[in-house]
Image (cartoon, rainbow, N blue to C red):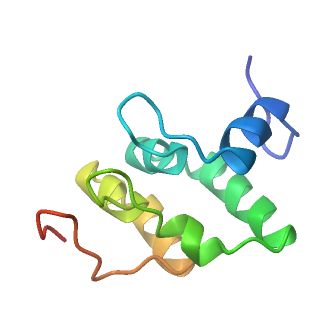
Amino acid sequence: MLLKYGEESDIFESYFWDQQQATKKRKLLLHQVASRGHLRIARMWIEKAATRGQDVKAMVNAEDSRSWQPLHCAAHGGKNEMIEFLLSHGAEINARTNKQQG
């Protein structure tokens, strides 16, 4: 199923917003979106979080099981636009992983 930007999706809502579940690789969905450079999806989720009064800064700084944040994933994948987007929404530029990588 393909979604257009801005469409409501019960699948995304129930999986990401309510449960904050990790995938099999223990990465949060925003980590996957950041590593692949899916800026439109990230923008949609951040906008929804902001309009619902959710803590956007906490969302963009969420850590996976290795202490990687979405910013680490975007940087590792060379996704410069995603890096700029995450930084503009409060991503911690000096964040370190559990192996002290930054």
Residue placed at 77% from the left, 30% from the top?
11
Residue 85: x percent and y percent?
52, 69
9 horizontally vs 46: left or right: right
Residue placed at 56% from the left, 52% from the top?
39
- Name which quarter of the figure residue 32 lies in: top left
Residue 41: x percent and y percent?
64, 46
| Number of marks | 0
Residue placed at 14% from the left, 67% from the top?
101
Q: Height in image: 45 above or below 21?
A: below
- In the foreground, 19 or 44: 19
Q: Height in image: 26 above or below 58?
A: above
Q: Height in image: 5 above or below 92?
A: above
- Name which quarter of the figure residue 93 lies in: bottom left
Residue placed at 19% from the left, 64% from the top?
98
16 horizontally vs 32: left or right: right
37 horizontally vs 88: left or right: left
Quarter of the C terminus within the rendering: bottom left
> Most extreme residue toward the top, as rendered?
1
Quarter of the N terminus within the rendering: top right
Residue 15: x percent and y percent?
69, 36
